[in-house]
Image (tube, rainbow, N blue to C red):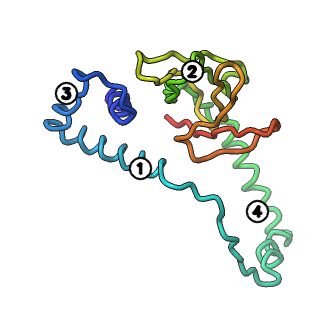
Amino acid sequence: MMDDMISMFIDDELSIDDKIEFVEKVHYDKAFKEESVELLNQERVIRSEVVDHVPPVKLKVSKGFFSSLFAPLLHPVGLVASSAVAGALIMLFFSMPSQVHTAVPYRFVIYRPDVIRAEITGSFTEWKKIPMKRTGSTGYWEITLNLPQGEHRFTYIIEGQERFADPTVATRERDDFGGENSIILVES
C-alpha cells in the first residue's frame, strides 16, 4: 500500500490532499521516509542513460583446464563416487515437496495524456491485449495484474496499433516484428 503511495507521488498522480498526507507521513515515519528516498534514487537511476554497450571481457583459461578438472571423475573410483552423488541429488530433488508459486500484484503505469486507449500485452497474458485504466485527468494509465514469479516480457499498445516498451524498464529485447519488449523479473 505504501509502495503504491510512493510510486504515485513519484509519478505525480496524487491529489493535493494525498500529497499533504504523503508529506506528513514522510515527516513522522522514518522508515517510510527512507523507503521513499530509496525509491526516488531508484527512479533517478532508471531515468539516467541506459548502457548500450558492454566491452568484451577476455578470460584466460590455461590449456588442459577442463581435462585436469574432470580427470578424477573418469577414474573408476571417481566414476562410482560421482554416480552416487548424482543419484543422491536426483533422489533429493524428487523427494522435495514442490513449492507453491503464488501470484504477485504488479502495477504497470504509463504517462500518455495524448491518447484515448492504452493496453498492455505480454507473456503473462499469453500476448492477449488487456485494457489499461485512465487515472483521472492526469494523463496516466495504469493496471495492476497478479503475475506469477519469474521473468516476463511485455509491451504497451496505444490506440490499438502503436507498440512501445516501458520507458522505466531498462531491460529490453527486440521482438520478431521489429519492436521492443520490456523484460521484468517478478519475485515475492
The percent coordinates of residue 61 (x first, y second) are 75, 80
Residue type at mark 2: give it: Val
Mark 2 or mark 3: which is in front?
2
Q: Secondary structure at mark 4?
A: helix
Residue lying at 71% horizontally and 49% vertically, measured from the top left: 88
Query: Which residue in the structure is indicated by mark 2?
Result: 115
Circle on res. 44: 1
Q: Tell me the amino acid under the disc marked 4.
A: Ala
Mark 1 vs mark 4, CA separation in Å:
52 Å
**Residue 154 placement, left or right of 142:** right
Other-residue count near label 2 (Cα within 10 Å), few / some / many at <14 / 14–19 / ≥20: few
Labels 2 & 4 near each other (Cβ < 8 A): no
Q: CA distance from mark 2 to mark 4?
A: 65 Å
Q: Is residue 8 above or below residue 57?
A: above
Tell me the crowding category of disc 4: few under 14, some 14 to 19, or many 20 or more residues within 10 angstroms, Cα based. Answer: few
Quarter of the image for residue 179 reads top right
Crowd band around label 1 with a 10 angstrom C-alpha radius: few (<14), some (14–19), many (20+): few
In the rendered view, would you say 124 is above or below 32? Answer: above
Q: Name which of mark 1 and mark 4 comes first in the sequence.
A: 1
Say what amino acid the circle numbered 3 marks: Ile
Task: Kindly identify which residue carries mark 3.
Answer: 20
Which percent across, then down, holds residue 94?
Answer: 70, 37
Residues 66 and 57: in front is 57
Residue 32 coordinates in the image, percent (x, y): 25, 38
